[in-house]
Image (tube, helix red, strand yellow):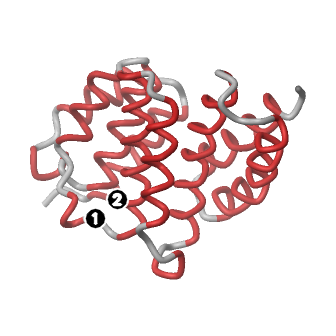
Amino acid sequence: MIDNLEILETFKNELYIGNYDKARLYGNNLPAEVRSHSRIGLMRIRACMLQGNMLAAREAYQEIAFDEASPGEKLILAVEAASIHLFFHSEIRQAVEMAEAAFSNVDKVTIEPVLWAEARRVYIRIWLSAYIYYEVSRDKKHEILAELLSISEILISSGWETEGVTARLTYADNIKD
């Protein structure tokens, strides 16, 4: 029996030290039934994205067994799907709409706070892409950025340190106009 927590820890460690290719290859070599687990699939997606390999990220996404995912995992994956869509199609408004639809289809109280925070972090990443291409006002940008500090606290206190620090860095990189 393969321990998913051990697999997730291996992914986390490899990604933390920047071994993106090693993490991607590790994930690709897992049995299909393990690769299809939502959290492992998410780690595979992230390893590919960090490498800039969006095609592999999309392929990892397509292998996930969504029927076994929790509502929070489904939310994160739906927002990541919008992010992948943005990359492949450069359809900013459609990606924002896809991400917003993912949030409108769930009840926040059914989602673990850390998973909600992570989904919001990815959502903000999409919104910042929209800002870069002038599809969002400066006021909306600052409204969106304000959420990142509380998101980072939730993520870090829940053991999602890399994502929490990423939220803080995103805030710091974007707070200036």
Could you tell me the amino acid type at mark 1?
A: Ala
> Looking at the picture, which amino acid does disc 2 mark?
Leu
Q: Earlier in the sequence, mark 1 or mark 2?
A: 2
Q: Position of residue 110 (x, y in %)?
A: 46, 80
Q: Residue at 26% across / 26% down in the picture? A: 25
Quarter of the picture holding the C terminus: top right
SS at circle 1: loop
Horizontal and vertical percent position of residue 64:
21, 49
Quickly name the residue at label 2: 5
Q: Are marks 1 and 2 in contact (CB under 8 Å)?
A: no
Q: Note whether 177 is above or below 77 in the view shown.
A: above
Where's the N terminus, which quadrant?
A: bottom left
Q: Is residue 13 left or right of residue 56?
A: right
Q: Is residue 126 left or right of residue 27?
A: right
Residue lying furthest left in this view?
32
The residue lying at 36 percent from left, 46 percent from top is 42
Of badges 1 and 2, nearer the viewer stands: 1
Q: Is residue 160 left or right of residue 140?
A: left
Q: Quadrant of residue 167?
A: top right
Residue 42: mark in rendering:
none
> What residue is drawn where x is 42% and y is 47%?
98
Residues packed near mark 2 inside 10 Å, few (<14), some (14 to 19) or many (20 plus)? few
- Determine the CA span between mark 1 and mark 2: 15 Å
Which residue matches tag 1? 69
Q: Residue at x 25, y 59 (%)?
A: 3
Mark 1 is surrounded, within 10 Å at the Cα level, by few (under 14), some (14 to 19) or many (20 or more) other residues, namely some
Quadrant in the rendering for residue 28? top left
**Tag 2's secondary structure?**
helix
Residue 82 drawn at (x, y percent): 41, 40
Q: How many marks?
A: 2
Quarter of the rendering containing residue 87: top left
